[in-house]
Amino acid sequence: MKGFDNQFKNLPDYILKITYQIWENNDVESIKKYYADTPQVSLPTPTRSPGGVIYGADPVIKSTKESKKLFPDRTLLGEDVIWTGNDKEGYFSSHRILSTSTHNNDGLYGEPTGKKLYYRTIADCACMNNQVYDEWLVRDQGAIVRQIGIEPKVFANNLILQEGGPDKSSKPFDENTPVKSIYTSPILPSGNIGETYGNILTSIMNVNAEKTINDNYDRSIQQFQPGGQLHYGRDECIKFWKQLRSSFPDALFTIEHVAFIEEESQAKKAAIRWSLNGKHEGNGIFGQPSNAKIYVMGINHVEFGSMGIKNEWVLYDETMIWKQILLKTG
């Protein structure tokens, strides 16, 4: 790869190795090397998450150190890297991580419980010349707080109070959050498996979830849902997507980014970042309608088998959705 250190064989190797170096090799300061100014212009790397956006290496270093203080034994197991790109346009990776850690220290999640935690994160990164120059990060906070013994709604309310109440609390990321970035999605060939999955998701959210899932999901589908939940079979997938949609019935569903892998040596895979933008106007998994303005940042990974979608990972941050609702309702 042009401009990358020779130690990196390809983009997945780059992503996996720098993640290990930063987190498990305890080389947090190496973030300054990999999250620097962009290759084309002097612009700090934006890192978007459901909680907001930060710029440059220093805030990422601060956040990483805070996380390592909370969970010093955290391991990051790279489950997959789905990627696209080339030397001319740059590279894009979607990295799915299973983290293990122990809640042994006081901090964001309250007094230590000693509980062993398992949770996923998906990090979408735009890369060029040995640098991450744009990032989108979704962590399954719902899984973390539930394992500790706190409901996501309660955690979100506690967070608002810790930040000084609704008037002083930080606002989660939404479509109006200003972001300075040079990233543009590459033009992908039509008919790819990522486009296929994007069409499936759009049909689930906008047309007919039950028919779309029955037509496109393997009967033995495994679906890894937010909150650390694992469910099996088409009926559970239909239930999940319907409950999400019913909470935000008129919200605009948008495919934000697509990456995919189509190689003979492995299953066809796709990574899609998506958003829901609208109001909390319906009954569903987020309780009674509040009319709160909501923005959901979601990232999915999927694997196809001979009978359709075999495995699906869906990530969004429940706590930040609840925070938006509670900032409206008090």
Image: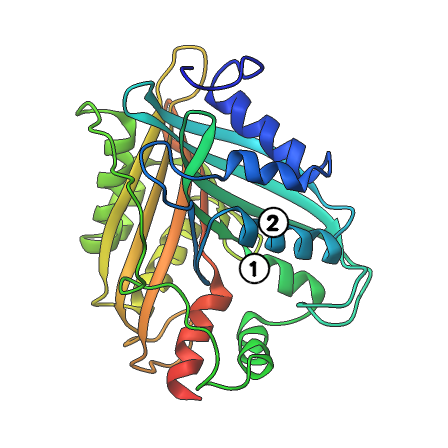
Residue 69 sits in which quadrant?
A: bottom right
Residue nearer the viewer, 48 or 131: 131
- Residue 190: x %, y % from top left: 17, 25
Identify the residue at the far bottom of this view: 330
Amino acid type of the residue that numbered disc 1 sits on in the rendered structure: Gln
Q: Which mark is residue 51?
A: none
**Left of 132 or right of it: where is 176?**
left
**Left of 242 or right of it: where is 36?**
right
Q: Which mark is residue 141?
A: 1
Q: If you read the primary sequence from the N terminus, does the residue marked by circle 2 or circle 1 appear first?
A: 2
Q: Is residue 289 above or below residue 311?
A: below
Instruction: State whether residue 219 appears in this view.
Output: no
Q: Residue at x 53, y 74 (%)?
A: 156
- Residue 239: x %, y % from top left: 39, 57
SS at mark 1 in the image: helix
| Residue picked out by circle 2 | 61
Residue 135 sits in which quadrant?
A: top left
Q: Is residue 315 above or below residue 8?
A: below
Instruction: State whether residue 302 appears in this view.
Output: yes
- Residue 72: x %, y % from top left: 77, 50
Quarter of the image where the C terminus is located: bottom left
Q: Residue at x 61, y 41 (%)?
A: 98
**Left of 200 or right of it: where is 285?**
right
Amino acid type of the residue that numbered disc 2 sits on in the rendered structure: Ile
Residue nearer the viewer, 215 or 120: 120
Q: Is residue 93 above or below residue 277?
A: above
SS at mark 2 in the image: helix
Q: Residue at x 53, y 18 (%)?
A: 5
Q: Residue at x 23, y 33 (%)?
A: 195
Crowding at dot 1, Cα within 10 Å, few <14 / some 14-19 / many 20+, comes out as many
